[in-house]
Image (cartoon, rainbow, N blue to C red):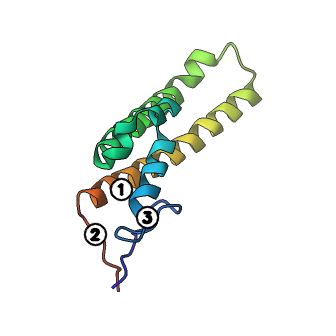
Amino acid sequence: MPQTAPPGWPATVPPPDSPGWQRAAVEWLLDQCPADYRGYAGWRRHPIALAWVATRHVDAQLQAMRQAYRDCRAELYEQLPPRAMTEVLANLEAEGLRLRAAARSAAMIHEALEGKRYAPRL
């Protein structure tokens, strides 16, 4: 029976147990981390460790984005005109949504690397 990926699974990563899924998962996880992470061979050799650190990295980015959204008006009020503030807040909101989705996807990949599999809902 073919494996199924749950909602929120990264589109570029095949479902668990599909041919090449771990290689695609590693590439996707590395895309979520700083570019320098690609220079460490250990992340490719140990995908579960990469998933573990990537989830923490994305979670930290999400926390930072939420804090930036909270602080933006107070800290940039005098430096930005009103239209710019609206644009900056919209950008922060969009990035927060992207990071929240990435955090969910990274967590699902980590779970899949630990052996969790998803069954389709009827």
Eyeballing the image, is 27 above or below 56? Answer: below
| Residue at (44, 37) in percent of width and height | 62
For the image, the number of numbered tags is: 3
Residue 92, disc: none
Quarter of the image holding residue 93? top right
Q: Are marks 1 and 2 in contact (CB under 8 Å)?
A: no
User: Around disc 1, counting alpha carbons within 10 Å, would you say few (fewer than 14), some (14 to 19), or many (20 or more)?
Assistant: many
Q: Which amino acid does the dot numbered 1 rest on?
A: Ile
Q: Amino acid at mark 2?
A: Arg
Q: Give the labeled residue for mark 2.
A: 117
Q: Nearer the viewer, mark 3 or mark 2?
A: 3
User: Between disc 1 and disc 2, whose residue precedes?
Assistant: 1
From the viewer's perspective, is residue 51 above or below residue 91? below
N-term-proximal mark, 1 vs 3? 3
Residue labelled with disc 3: 20
Give the camera-side residue of 18 and 102. Answer: 18
Spot occupied by residue 60 in the image (x, y as percentages of width and height): 39, 33
In primary-sequence order, the first of circles 3 and 2 is: 3
What is the quadrant of residue 121 in the picture? bottom left
Q: Residue at x 36, y 67 (%)?
A: 16
- According to the picture, the residue beneath numbered tag 1 turns out to be 109
- Percent from the top left, x then y, of residue 106? 39, 50
Mark 1–mark 2 Cα distance, whole angstroms, equals 10 Å
Q: Are marks 3 and 2 in contact (CB under 8 Å)?
A: no
Element class at badge 3: loop
User: Above or below — where is 24 with respect to 95?
Assistant: below
Q: Quadrant of the N terminus?
A: bottom left
Q: Where 54 sits versus 119, above or below? A: above
Q: Position of residue 110 (x, y in %)?
A: 31, 52
Quick check: 79 left or right of 117? right
Q: CA distance from mark 1 to mark 3?
A: 14 Å
The crowd level at tag 3 (other Cα within 10 Å; few <14, some 14-19, many 20+) is few
